[in-house]
Amino acid sequence: MSPSPHPRIGSGNALADEILCGGFPANSINIVMGLPGTGKSLFAEQLVFANAGDDRPIVYLTTMSEPLAKVLTYLQRFAFYDEKKLGTAVIYDEVGPLLAKDGIGALLPALEETIRTNSPKIIVIDSFKVLHDLSPSVSEMRRTLFELSGILTAYQTTVFLIGEYSDEDAQRLPEFAVADGIVQMLRNPLSTRDERFIRVLKLRGSRYLEGLHGFKITSGGLEIYPRLVSPDVPEGFEFRDRRLTTGVPGLDDLLGGGVWCGSMTLLSGPTGAGKSTIGLQFALEGLRHEQRSLYVNFQENPTVVARALHNLGFAVEDARAQGLYLMYASPVELQIDSLIVTMFRMIAAEGIQRVVIDALGDLVMASSDPQRLHNYLYALTQQFAVLGVTSILTFESDAGSSEAATSAPGGRFSYMADNIVMLQTQVRDEQMTRSVTVLKARGTQHDLRVRPLEITASGVRVG
């Protein structure tokens, strides 16, 4: 999506601005809503310091949610805080004492005085929802909001109203009717971590990227990860008439000569069947053909991966020097949005042509929303196809049966794969044997036979 040509106020985060198609429209009234602890104030403060310059100042008004001294104390812990801008480019003030003394009627005179004195380009009021608790009646709150809207609209300033609003509040409170933009912050507590999301509910006169977008709170502020979307449908279809070797002796023959460039292969099988080794061999094969490879791993720590590389004849540093990129994320702390954004940054920056994701099951476990995961995986495979990135995704099935292999995950993923390779293990005469079958190879007359699979000192090979 290309940004709108209208003047914009940046959020202080390039990826958040991507979601907003350039930022918030200038001279607009915006609401940043969410329950306590979701990151509303931090989002506003990061925006404030990113836009603070030598021109008109920015005013941040606190009401009766937190004392001003406490707000400033916590603000100093973040990297975007700049003490040199405080008091000149960024002015913090509080109207809480006036509201406590004179009620909601004290807000408008205080705001008019701030505008006359400072001529701010941005005004933040945190928390605005507290005014509902101070208002003697609904009609008084509506009158105050009407006059406030008139003052802010007449003056060339962009306004952000921060509040602990719920979804029900958004349906009934009058400020949501006059707001030009509404941004919602969400928090989903899990057993080992919290999922945080940002969503744009409204941006008057502007496009924006809909849906939930993940983010994390770091020492640098909010790190936001726009959700992955399917690429635009191309006007023409480019057929890449080129096959890539897998690096697994004998497997290319089963696949009719290798895998098509830009295709995605689902590698399914039980534990110990050789999935991770095949993934590494595929990535290393790219180095032999001067194709940079990315190996994304959730199960085995870097030490284990280094040992596996050594067994395949590569030292870690040598493999990296030739174009192998390793990305490890603990399945306990795994956040899919962060992983996807980081992965595509690396693909674009390094010109990566092969990707291995080991294993798909960890993404399933990390996702609290099966539909959201399904959409991510579909968009992922489509983006890879457009970019010409050839990928292997491994999936651990319980028994290596065809039913288990084609139901990963939840029976809705196998149709996305161009190839499905099933690994099996069996015990015969008190000895475990391995086999491989190509269940699917799109656009290929592939070998349907069950073939023996061996794991040797130099890697996996088809017998």
Image: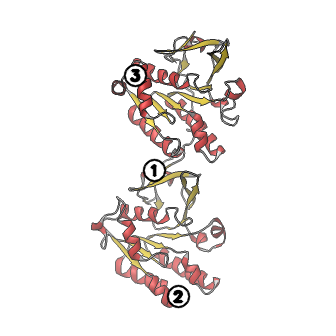
Answer left or right for 86 relative to 24.
Answer: left
Which of the numbered marks, if any, corresponds to residue 15?
1
Query: Which dot, 2 or 1, sits closer to the camera?
Result: 2
Can you say whether 381 is above or below 314 in the image?
below
Query: Which dot, 3 or 2, sits closer to the camera?
Result: 3
Q: Residues within 10 Å of mark 1 (few under 14, many from 20)?
A: some
Residue lying farthest to the front in this orientation: 430
Answer left or right for 97 relative to 399.
Answer: left
Which of the numbered marks, if any, corresponds to residue 310?
3
Q: Measure the C-alpha gap from mark 2 to mark 1.
A: 40 Å
Residue type, numbered disc 3: His
Q: Earlier in the sequence, mark 1 or mark 3?
A: 1
Q: Residues within 10 Å of mark 3 (few under 14, many from 20)?
A: some
Q: Position of residue 455 (x, y in %)?
A: 53, 16
Residue lying farthest to the left in this orientation: 84
Q: Measure the C-alpha gap from mark 1 to mark 3.
A: 38 Å
Closest to the observer: 331 or 122?
331
Circle 2 SS class: helix
Closest to the observer: 88 or 374?
374
Q: How many marks?
A: 3
Q: Quadrant of residue 453?
A: top right
Name the residue that disc number 2 marks.
103
Which of the numbered marks, if any, corresponds to residue 394?
none
Can you say whether 252 is above or below 126 in the image?
above
Answer left or right for 14 relative to 272.
Answer: left
